[in-house]
Image (spheres, rainbow, N blue to C red):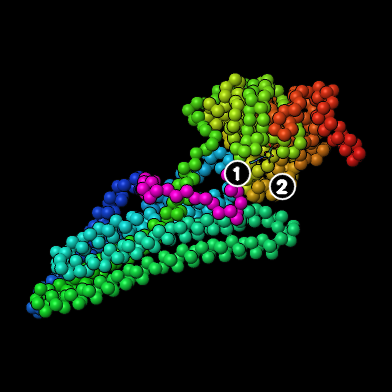
Amino acid sequence: MAYNASKLDEKTIRMSRKELFKRLFSYLKPFKKTIILITFVMIIIMFVNLLNPYILKISIDNYIKNSDVKGLLIIGIIGIILNIISSILSRYRIVTMGDITNKIVVNIRHDLYKHIQKLSFDFFDERPVGKILARVIGDINSLQNFFHSIIVNFFPEILTIITVTIIMLIMNYKLAIVTLLVIPLLIMTLAVIQILVRKRWENFRKKRSNLNSYTHEEFSGIKVIQAFNAEKKAENTFFNYVDEMVNSFINAVRLQDFLDPAIFISQGVGLVIIYTYSFNLIKNNQLTIGELFAFTWYMSIFWRPIFNIANFYNNLITSFSAADRVFEIFNIKPSVKDTKENKMPEIKGEIEFKDVNFSYDREKKVLKSINFKVKEGESIALVGPTGAGKTTIINLLSRFYDPSEGQILVDGKDIKDYSIESYREQMGIMLQDTFLFSTTIKENIIYSNPNINEKEIVKSSIAIGSHTFIQNLEKKYDTNVNERGTRLSVGQRQLISLTRAMIANPKILILDEATSNIDTETEQKVQQGIKELLKNRTSFIIAHRLSTIRDCDKIFYIDNGEIEEMGTHMQLMEKQGKYYELYMTQFKFLKEGV
Ligand SMILES: Nc1ncnc2c1ncn2[C@@H]1O[C@H](COP(=O)(O)OP(=O)(O)OP(=O)(O)O)[C@@H](O)[C@H]1O
């Protein structure tokens, strides 16, 4: 838990190779037919490639040796035609494979995006957004190499190695066996490098993810950095992250660079063995010159796929750590379980919390035995000190989290038993963090109800009090608000966000500090609008300014995760308890302030 910091390396859970391959290969299934066609094309290409040395052998042993120019010409033309066909097919194969690998990567990214969207708040609590981005973008891009290598290189190369080995064995089995002697040594070297390198690539990905997360956070908080003249400090931290990433990269690459020399040495040793051994065979007439030329050509055809497979192997090792990171997220199930098939019927609005306990981190209890029942259409205010648990009650009612213990009933039904979508579409939620998207005001308002018409938008905006300032903007409702709505003042953002919640026409309305940043004069107007819109809906309002919630049907005073007092404003004032104290403090403060 609680891993949400750029500098903390993520813990990745390694999957077994079998499981990884199973998951990766499942993405090849939709392209089965094209892959079969491509494999067929590849076999033709391979056949032509393997024929070339044989054509050379015939040319030398049959035509050059006997000075048969006509025969040489014919076999030359056949060779050229075959190679032209092979080149055309090669081009087709490369273009088609590129297309397939791109599509596969799009599919994985799409699936991952859809999956992450369904994950519950605790998933996002536990990791910085930058680290999620690193997986959705960087790690998935690395998988493209894997698929490209596996389809473009791996299968045809394996096929080539097998066929060339058979040809070499048929041509001269003694020479072939001698040639293959170096292979076990090579495989052992590759295996050792693989074991060591995988860990280093894993480390590189973690460092890259940290850098991603830090950069994302720094640019999001650039105003704070500039306000506190902290550019230099931020820059130094940034370069530390870059250094860590570069070092981890060099560490991995250094080890991986042993792969190529290992292959070169094996190939060199193989050639020396062939020439030494074939010298005696030719002397004893057990091998012709043409056969030797053809054999060495086959040898080079044999080593080319080994090089390519080693490259593929490189990709595979780097892709394993990327795949681990991608599929690890796929394995995370939303902690808030969705009962998709069970649609929530139309909500009337009776809400009951039955012995609800909750903890974000399974350690510290944030809500303790919360019990209350609210009638249909009532407005409830949640008040109390900072960190008391007010937003947490709203989070549970909105099903952003599920209670650790107890039940939340709406119209007598446990909300856990119904689909989240069918439940939330009957709610209007305005969160404390008024988040606007970088699009127009209109798009932001209709986010909760895309089918609403212009007239309704204006009507709601007038009721909430956002219409006047929107009319004064250069493009009115079509004005772009910039990322997170920075084009608007904080109060204006709240008004837009409030209009968005209202436009959802919800049965349950939740307003968390809806008017905390709006000036007193506008607020009075907004209060009137809110009052209108609260009619016929059950609503929960969190407010620190108590003047705004005096008229609510019930007020809950929350402290330290418990409901300490409950009643109307008048009842709680008469009781002269904690609510009374808070109210009087604010009242006195305002009076003195005035
Ligand atoms: N995502 C989270 N992960 C862990 N702890 C959390 C999380 N959100 C809130 N908390 C903790 O839960 C407690 C209750 O927080 P909550 O946001 O419900 O308080 P609040 O009454 O709404 O406060 P405020 O009036 O300041 O908004 C606090 O101690 C807070 O630190």
Magenta span includes 214? no
Magenta part of the chain: 1-26
Q: Position of residue 135 (x, y in %)?
A: 50, 51
Where residue 378 sits, quadrant-wise, is top right
Q: Name the residue tied to disc 2.
A: 488
Quadrant field for ligand 1: top right
**Distance from mark 1 CB to nearest ligand 1 atom below 8 Å:** yes
Report whether residue 480 is seen.
no
Spatial CA span between label 1 and label 2: 27 Å
- The residue lying at 34 percent from left, 55 percent from top is 150
- The residue lying at 58 percent from left, 48 percent from top is 3
Q: Tag 2: residue type? A: Leu
The number of numbered discs placed on residues in the rendered structure image is: 2
Q: Residues within 10 Å of mark 1 (few under 14, many from 20)?
A: some
Magenta span includes 10? yes
Q: Earlier in the sequence, mark 1 or mark 2?
A: 1
Q: Position of residue 362 (x, y in %)?
A: 60, 37
Which mark's residue is nearer the viewer, 1 or 2? Answer: 1
Determine whether the residue tagged by mark 2 lies in a helix, strand or loop: loop
Q: Tag 1: residue type? A: Asp
Circle on res. 125: 1
Q: Specify the principal SS of the magenta part.
A: loop
Where residue 181 sits, quadrant-wise, is bottom left
- The residue lying at 21 percent from left, 60 percent from top is 163
Residue 252 in the figure: left or right of residue 160? right
